[in-house]
Amino acid sequence: MTIQFTKMQGAGNDYIYVNTINQPVTNPKELAIQWSTYHTGIGSDGLVLIGPSHIADFSMRIFNADGSEAKMCGNASRCIGKYLYDKKLTQKKQISLETLSGIKHLELHVKNGAVKEVTVDMGCPDILEESLNLSCPNGTFTGTFVSMGNPHFVTFVEDIKQANLPVTGPLLEHHPYFPDRANIEFVQFLSEGNARMRVWERGSGITQACGTGACASAVALIAHGRAQKGDKIQIQMDGGTLTIEWNPTDNHVYMTGNAVTVFEGSIKL
Ligand SMILES: N[C@H](CCC[C@H](N)C(=O)O)C(=O)O
């Protein structure tokens, strides 16, 4: 059997997208591992399944490159918006998407008949620990523990170039404090409304960008007085910049950024 897939990326965070409405997938964990592998697979940060929903317009499931299922993915939610509109699975420019962390609302920004950017209402953040000190073999790291439906540890650094992601990332991801592991963001404050972030993602390692991580980073900046609610905060990552607003009126976080189709493909099961 052959599966049709679409490779897409948001701010460089790339996933394999499969429409399970017309082609069901029974072993997504194994396929995420197999297909995400470079050289022998397709190569990606993970696998995203687009499906039907009884409570929203569509549904999303997201699997990291190690096969672990996450409750939310910001970059993938934007790409799903593009996928659905560009492939004429919907004509709506406001779409509701069922995820394991609740229903998310997407606003599609269309130009010349195709989605260029999407704004996602990411809901309310949950600051679990405003200032948490975690000891690792290579030092102690102070950060903010934030949930955007998935867990994030945001640590501020003076110089992003000095952040040793390959060593510190996995040590913090697997720290005993995080029974479900965590995504790790290293953030360098640039000015009010601007920050540089690099991410070690739970289950995928270093990625070019993390949408929920950009939201968690903006929330941490505001919690520490380095930005204000209502600011349009530019989170600059390796693969691109996302605009994040923590709205003071509804307390929701809004994420805006691109969504790009890279190629269509098929692969034998
Ligand atoms: N690695 C994340 C899932 C992907 C999130 C990220 N790619 C995003 O854009 O939000 C986790 O295990 O929670």
Image: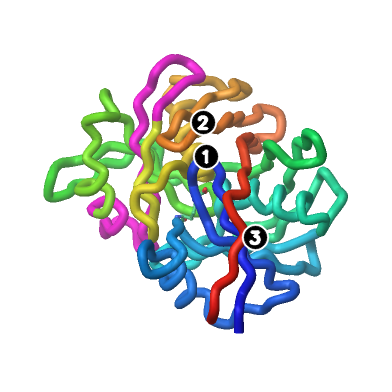
Q: Is residue 203 left or right of residue 19?
A: left
Amino acid type of disc 3?
Answer: Thr
Give whichever of 3, 164 is nearer the camera: 3
- The residue lying furthest to the left in this view is 137
Q: Earlier in the sequence, mark 2 or mark 1?
A: 1
SS category of the residue bearing label 2: strand
Residue 170 in percent (x, y) is at 26, 54
As shown in the figure, which amino acid type bears the numbered disc 2?
Answer: Thr
* Contact flag, marks 2 and 1 (Cβ < 8 Å): yes
Residue displayed at 80% across by 69% down = 54
Whole-angstrom CA distance, mark 2 to mark 1, is: 7 Å
Residue drawn 87% across the image and 50% down it: 91
The residue beneath circle 2 is 241
Residue hosting label 1? 11
The numbered disc on residue 231 is none
Is residue 176 highlighted in magenta?
yes
Label 3 belongs to which residue? 99
Tell me if residue 8 is in the magenta stretch: no
What span is colored magenta in the figure? 171-196
Q: Residue at x 25, y 29 (%)?
A: 161
